Amino acid sequence: MSISASMNAGVLGLAANATRLSAISDNIANSGTVGYKRAEVQFASLVTTAGSRTQYNAGGVSSAVRLAITEKGALDATSVSTDIAIDGRGFLPVVNAAAPADIDTATDETVLTKAGSFRPDADGFLRNAAGYTLMGWKLNPDGTTVVANPARDGFQNLEPVNIAGMGFTGQPTTQVTFAANIPAQATSAGGDGAPITMPIEYYDALGKAERLTLELTPVVPAAGSSNQWQLRVLDSAGGGAAIGAMTIDFNATGPNAGRLSAVTPTTGAYDGATGAVTVTTAGGQAIEVNIGALNGTGGLTQFAGSFTPSAATKNGSAFASVATVEIGQDGVLSAVLTNGVRQPIFQVPVVDLVNPNGLTAIDGNAYRLSRDAGALYLWDGGTGPVGTTEGYSLERSTTDVARELTHLIETQRAYSSNAKIIQTADEMLQETTNLKR
């Protein structure tokens, strides 16, 4: 009985070591596979109940395969902006479909991967080397998601990431901020009354650059100081015609000395609380020119000295084409335009699960959801427990070839030893058979 049990234990040992050899073979074969997670084979002893204390029956060994899915590989820098790695916990959502344009998250299975070697295909969809298409939430130009409050406990609001046709029109200017100190002595008797001009570029609805000129003319009294200026807003699109005109006064004494005390518009409108002068360009475009709130610390001030502009900013942009696309650490994929403007186009979430090691591995270095993996959640990169999304980067395979070769030698020796057990047991049974002769 014990000889047969020994032979059975040897057979189980051969099977277990053959399984380990298979895992080692996969690990070595995928030592250069981006995002690959090595497989481990762990052995567990099998025990059979002996008939008495003087006998021992060999039970053998069983094997269990585990993927080290949560093990993190080192990040390699690349020169491709659409190479994406997660620096930490989490996965990228992808779908395997022959026609990404027809992907429907209600019917097509979304799986997870760490293989972020994405390249645009002929239609502009980002696909990795295994053919999986990257998924994300589409964004409005202001960075908000097209689908308000997208679901984060499922994939239903995701769509294939496409970077084709990203030639954006210019964004018209809607706000201009101007801050400067204008000389108080210019409003004193004897001043030359020369105007001060400050040109500020703006963009119209077609992305064409035009110019607003703020013209400040001091009111020079016969005696004393007026602390008053005439402000005109001139528009180059209208041949330099004034689209805004107003009288502005400054405090001469008290704690608010040098700050705006009153603005009286004759053309345009002024909001004393926000400091915005609203004008309409020759092309019918409304622009808010912020010159500072009444008695506020920003915008225009009047102190003795020279004309000193401190801020002249605007929003909007000229027409531009896409130079490249890049992903930020928060998962926002942006088109970088030739004029330097970054236009957000997609938000790629980082998927986390209760038990990532419970995922089911499938072809193409991807993982399918399973009951053992638990509930999932879609995070922004770098928030909660997940890592940041890194562009120009790829995660290496977690295979250590030197360690695998060591395991290969160990497995070979163990396999040979188990084969020797079977051979020895066979010889002992043969001796038992020979006793009958």
Image (cartoon, helix red, strand yellow):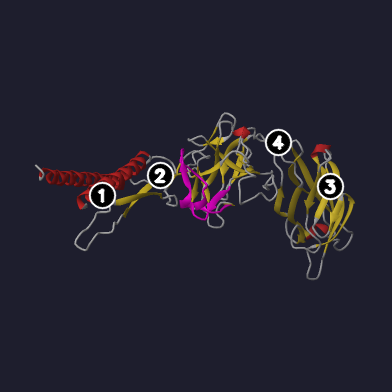
Q: Disc 2 on helix, strand or loop?
A: loop
Closer to the chain start, of discs 2 and 1, is 1
Which residue is denoted by mark 3 in the rendering?
Answer: 279
Is any atom of residue 219 visible in this view? Answer: no
Question: What separation in Å lies between label 3 and label 4 (alpha carbons)?
Answer: 23 Å
Contact check, label 2 and label 1, Cβ < 8 Å: no
Q: Amino acid at mark 1?
A: Ala
The stretch in magenta equals 349-377
Q: Amino acid at mark 2?
A: Ser
Question: What separation in Å lies between label 4 and label 2 (alpha carbons)?
Answer: 42 Å
Neighbourhood count class around disc 4 (C-alpha, 10 Å): few under 14, some 14–19, many 20 upward: some
Which residue is denoted by mark 1 in the rendering?
Answer: 9
Between residue 428 and residue 296, name the one nearer to us: 428
Q: Disc 3 on helix, strand or loop?
A: strand
Q: Amino acid at mark 4?
A: Thr
Residue depicted at 10% across the width and 45% down the height: 435
Which numbered mark, 3 or 2, is in the foreground of this view? Answer: 2
Closer to the chain start, of discs 4 and 1, is 1
Between residue 278 and residue 346, name the one nearer to us: 346
Which residue is denoted by mark 4 in the rendering?
Answer: 169
Closer to the chain start, of discs 3 and 4, is 4
Q: Amino acid at mark 3?
A: Val
Q: Disc 4 on helix, strand or loop?
A: loop
Which numbered mark, 4 or 2, is in the foreground of this view? Answer: 2
Which residue is denoted by mark 2 in the rendering?
Answer: 397
